[in-house]
Image (cartoon, grey):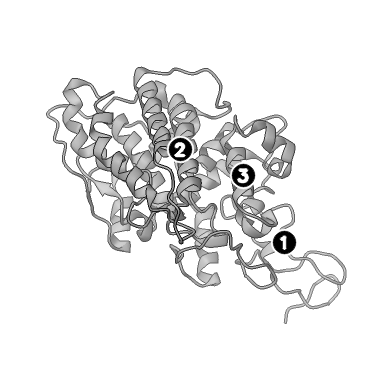
């Protein structure tokens, strides 16, 4: 056993408290092992997470098989790869031109080789660049800040409000199963039946034929009706639907701030209501060691909102007054407040990764790290991306 250089006593065992923040490469305020005898730092690097010495994940809802099942050593090596990866950069979305060749999008990804092929393609880089551009558009802005709101943005917000009203019209049924209320299937069936007409409320006449391609992305954005679950793959489909609208020029660059502050905020409200009313299970959750059971993008957009804020820092998530007073304006705080609402127990136990990120010194590092993590933990994972669709607007190259 290695000993501590200052006092000669053995190094203490590694614990989850000394893990590095995978999103940024910076440890939390309490990271790093210390010598039990003299209190000085040990020679250990930040180790991978271990379940020893901590409480088990909370039992507030059943967790399906993790999207990734690997040893702590493999997990640690992947965390280091995320840390060393370059930060994704924003890109302009190329606008399509006639003749249009819209087609029914289909699944293409079945293996890690397919994932590598996808991420080597220009369309993959451009899609991620679109997400980065959305993140940059909301940088330093509150959700209520005035911004350009086009008729398209207003129409999409109206559609999401309509979907929210349906929840009131289709209440959950009484059933023995605690999770996965079957009334959600009725809600989703109405979604599928009306999606084309909803798209036609804002698509211009020369793009009406695009419904054959954009509707499948839209209907896959709100969960799976067979499994009655929802996860980051469905959220990514919503981003892909917005990307398709940008490819058609229906959503323009000047709309990006409103797309995040109006459209995505409304989408997030809708999904939380669906999760609570119909008890949607998390799809492909990483369990206690994931960022969140359902979402990823609001953490990216929310951290961008807070970049450069004079008073609120990553550690502010532990201040209940800040969460209560600013959750309506900042998506990151809204996400933390929602997690604390639906999960019981110590935050550091049920959300250790978010707790670790709270020790990062500034929001810029949090945002850049989360972008790298989104690419690695969502866009490069077969169990998530095997459901992603490819057509003419998002081509399989």
Residue 162 figure quarter: top left
Q: Secondary structure at mark 3?
A: helix
Which residue is tagged 1?
32
Q: Position of residue 132 (x, y in %)?
A: 45, 37
Q: Earlier in the sequence, mark 1 or mark 2?
A: 1
Q: Position of residue 68 (x, y in %)?
A: 45, 65
Count of marks placed on residues? 3
- The residue where tag 2 is placed is 270
Which residue is depicted at the point 49% across and 28% down? 261
User: Can you identify the residue that label 3 sits on?
Assistant: 336
Pick whichever, 237 or 195, lies toward us: 195
Task: Where is residue 179? Give x, y as percent.
Answer: 47, 57
Residue closest to the far bottom: 1
Q: 187 or 134, which is in the foreground?
A: 187
**Residue at figure coordinates x 48%, y 28% from the top left:** 137
Dot 1 and dot 2 residues touching (CB under 8 Å): no
* Above or below: residue 109 compared with residue 396: below
What residue lies at 28% left-to-right and 25% top-to-bottom? 249
Q: Residues within 10 Å of mark 3 (few under 14, many from 20)?
A: some
Residue 5 % position (x, y): 80, 72
Taking the image as drawn, is residue 313 in sight?
Answer: yes
Q: Nearer the viewer, residue 128 or 346?
A: 346
């Amino acid at each position: 056993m290695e000993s501590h250089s200052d006092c000669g006593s053995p190094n203490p065992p590694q614990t989850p408290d000394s893990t590095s923040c995978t999103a940024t490469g910076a440890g939390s305020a309490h990271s790093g092992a210390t010598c039990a005898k003299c209190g000085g730092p040990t020679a250990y690097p930040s180790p991978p997470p271990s379940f020893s010495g901590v409480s088990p994940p909370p039992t507030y809802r059943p967790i399906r098989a993790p999207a990734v099942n690997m040893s702590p050593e493999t997990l640690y090596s992947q965390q280091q790869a995320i840390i060393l990866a370059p930060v994704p950069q924003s890109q302009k979305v190329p606008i399509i031109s006639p003749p249009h060749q819209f087609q029914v999008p289909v699944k293409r990804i079945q293996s890690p080789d397919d994932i590598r092929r996808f991420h080597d393609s220009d369309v993959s880089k451009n899609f991620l660049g679109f997400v980065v551009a959305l993140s940059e558009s909301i940088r330093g802005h509150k959700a209520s800040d005035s911004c350009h709101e086009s008729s398209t943005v207003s129409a999409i917000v109206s559609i999401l409000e309509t979907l929210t009203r349906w929840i009131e019209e289709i209440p959950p049924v009484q059933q023995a199963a605690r999770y996965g209320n079957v009334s959600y299937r009725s809600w989703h069936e109405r979604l599928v039946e009306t999606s084309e007409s909803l798209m036609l409320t804002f698509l211009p006449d020369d793009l009406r034929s695009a419904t054959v391609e954009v509707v499948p992305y839209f209907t896959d954005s709100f969960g799976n009706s067979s499994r009655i679950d929802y996860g980051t793959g469905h959220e990514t489909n919503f981003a892909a639907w917005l990307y398709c609208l940008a490819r058609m020029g229906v959503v323009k660059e000047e709309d990006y701030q409103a797309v995040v502050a109006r459209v995505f905020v409304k989408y997030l409200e809708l999904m939380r209501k669906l999760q609570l009313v119909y008890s949607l299970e998390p799809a492909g959750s990483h369990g206690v060691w994931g960022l969140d059971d359902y979402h990823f993008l609001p953490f990216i957009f929310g951290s961008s909102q807070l970049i450069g804020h004079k008073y609120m820092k990553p550690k502010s998530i532990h201040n209940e007054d800040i969460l209560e007073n600013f959750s309506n304006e900042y998506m990151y705080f809204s996400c933390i407040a929602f997690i604390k609402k639906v999960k019981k127990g110590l935050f550091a136990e049920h959300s250790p990764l978010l707790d670790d990120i709270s020790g990062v010194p500034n929001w810029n590092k949090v945002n850049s790290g989360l972008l790298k993590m989104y690419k690695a933990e969502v866009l490069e994972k077969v169990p998530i991306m095997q459901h992603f669709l490819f057509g003419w607007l998002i081509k399989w190259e």
